[in-house]
Amino acid sequence: MSIPQDSESVLASEQQPIIQTLNLQKNYRTGFWLNKVVTSLQDFSLQVMPGETFGLLGPNGAGKTTLLKLLLGIAKPTAGRGFVLGKPLGDGAAKQQLGYLPENPYFYDYLTGWEFLTFAAGLFQIPNQVQRRRIPALLDLVGLDRKAAPKTNAPLF
Ligand SMILES: Nc1ncnc2c1ncn2[C@@H]1O[C@H](COP(=O)(O)OP(=O)(O)OP(=O)(O)O)[C@@H](O)[C@H]1O
Ligand SMILES: [Mg+2]
């Protein structure tokens, strides 16, 4: 997860933790009848302050991915609470400020780079005027020629 450092985009004040979790727990129901419970994360409390570089290490199955899913609002905690950029887990305004590189990124073959970024920005409800500024900047950042990732007016679906 990357957290933008420029002051206009950071929602939290400098004194607030960027990430805070309080006794987070996540149980998954598994099995054919969903009658088995796996506890992926238990009683997990963490605080990361602005400017800190934090590495999350642990053996396979320790719950690292589960924690990231909870921080990003992809999964909901079974118990406990958490805040990212001062907002409760899953808050849309905080999500708009987060970048996340998944372990197994999936790109749709039929979308251009521009279209994929537009699609992703739409999922995170990033305002159109911000999209118009950031999409070309991001394509430039990764060295994608804008001609190779043309903007089309075709509907995505
Ligand atoms: N969707 C799920 N349904 C059931 N159990 C799950 C689910 N996701 C994770 N688990 C279980 O929760 C525990 C923690 O898994 P998690 O993937 O968070 O660990 P991890 O630290 O990311 O591991 P790795 O280093 O292998 O990526 C494991 O026992 C895993 O099998
Ligand atoms: Mg993992």
Image (spheres, rainbow, N blue to C red):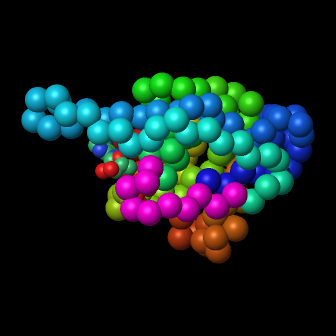
Q: In the rendered view, does 116 fall on the left or right side of 37?
A: right
Tally of numbered discs: 0
Query: 43 left or right of 97?
Result: left
Q: Position of residue 15 (x, y in %)?
A: 89, 37
Depth check: give the residue in front, 131 or 120. Answer: 120
| Residue 74 versus residue 134 in the image, above or below | above
Q: Is residue 60 magenta?
A: yes
Q: What is the quadrant of residue 90 in the picture?
A: top right
In the picture, measured across the screen, residue 138 lies left or right of residue 90, that is right
Q: Residue at x 74, y 30 (%)?
A: 86
What quarter of the picture does the C terminus occupy? Answer: top left
> Is residue 139 visible from the viewing direction of this image?
yes
The image quadrant that residue 20 belongs to is top right
Q: Nearer the viewer, residue 107 or 91?
A: 91
From where the camera sits, is residue 111 visible? Answer: no
The location of residue 19, given as percent across then percent down, is 69, 41
For the residue pair 104 and 38, the one nearer the viewer reads as 38
**Residue that sits furthest to the front in the current view:** 43
Picture residue at 59% right of the left edge, 58% below the top = 56
**Residue drawn at 69 percent across, 46 percent down:** 132
Image x and y of residue 4, in percent? 76, 51
Magenta stretch?
54-63
**Residue at figure coordinates x 78%, y 39% from the top left:** 17
Label the magenta part by its dominant secondary structure.
Answer: loop
